[in-house]
Amino acid sequence: MKFIVTTPQSIDSVNETMAEFMSDSGLEYIPRRSSSLAKLAAEHGAEGVIVWETEGPILYVENEKLFFHPSMAKVRIAEYRKKGREDLLIQACQLNKGDSFLDCTLGMGADSIVASYFSETGKITGLEYQSEVAHVISWGMKLYQGNMPWLNKAIKRVEIINSDHKKFLCQQGDQSYDIVYFDPMFTKPLLRSQPISPLRKLANHDALNKDTIQEACRVARKRVVLKTLLAGLEIERLGFQKIMGSKHNPITYGVIITD
Ligand SMILES: C[S@@+](CC[C@H](N)C(=O)[O-])C[C@H]1O[C@@H](n2cnc3c(N)ncnc32)[C@H](O)[C@@H]1O
């Protein structure tokens, strides 16, 4: 898929931050010259356009847009802060203060941010295969400035790397992260009525394989955690032990304890 980068219609110059984004992402800049995004995309044979807004990049693909927003992570952390309700991911990972966390499937980054909040000081790394998603989320996080310091801090601590987790894991030393986590794409959206989100359109949908899990077990000091759906067939196929999930909650977690 080809992507181009441009400015909002009212601006026709590249500022310093946008120039950094261009060099980081390696994407082509096309001056806006008041064109519509559809026209610009058609003229340059692009399937997607990234518009550099002051608050961060917005990716447009097939009339849908993708940009960083911390809403899901914020709701989950707020549940804990207000009601003391522990997040299921944190329970499944048994994540403690200071733990390092390797998120092998970053997506919109909600799980990484939640892990970052609870870890407080441990290293948090998020890997994303799809290059434009990785860059849009990474720069959206860099530029995000909300009015809740605890959320800002959790977001800024996430280091995002555009990489295939299979490759990345092979390059890591034994026991180099406390927790290694996977949340692969579900084969079907949770609700039939849900529109196909831009993330679903762009994401890598490959199933996990046993070699990847074996590498994850080598890299994880404490545990490897997998989030999946329904009967948790993936959990059995990949050798995890099912630890959470019920008739009422379609989300299931599996773990492999490595310590
Ligand atoms: C279900 S989403 C993850 C959602 C995420 N947990 C969140 O909180 O937003 C899965 C993401 O993993 C990415 N992915 C799939 N296979 C990957 C791989 N081999 N390496 C890195 N990322 C991968 C997909 O592109 C997609 O963005």
Image (cartoon, helix red, strand yellow):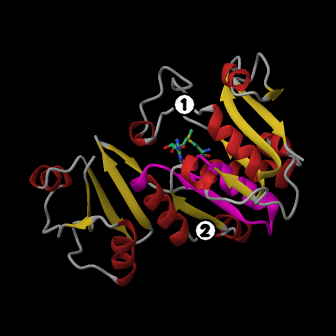
Report the side of 197 relative to 224 (left or right): left
The image quarter containing residue 85 is top right
The image quarter containing residue 181 is top right
Could you say whether the residue bearing mark 2 is in a helix, strand or loop?
loop
Residue 14: give x, y in percent of width and height.
27, 79
Q: How far apart are marks 1 and 2 (CA)?
A: 35 Å
| Label 2 Cα crowd, 10 Å radius (few <14 / some 14-19 / many 20+) | few
Residue at the limit of the structure toward the bottom, as seen here: 16
Does residue 176 belong to the magenta stretch?
A: no
Q: Name the residue that disc number 1 marks.
A: 207
Report the side of 129 relative to 119 (left or right): left
Image quadrant, ligand 1: top right
Q: Name the residue that disc number 2 marks.
A: 146
> Disc 2 residue type?
Gly
Residue at x-position 72% and y-position 49%: 180
Residue at x-position 70% and y-position 45%: 216
> Disc 1 residue type?
Ala
Residue 76: give x, y in percent of width and height.
73, 47
Note whether 17 is above or below 64 in the view shown: below
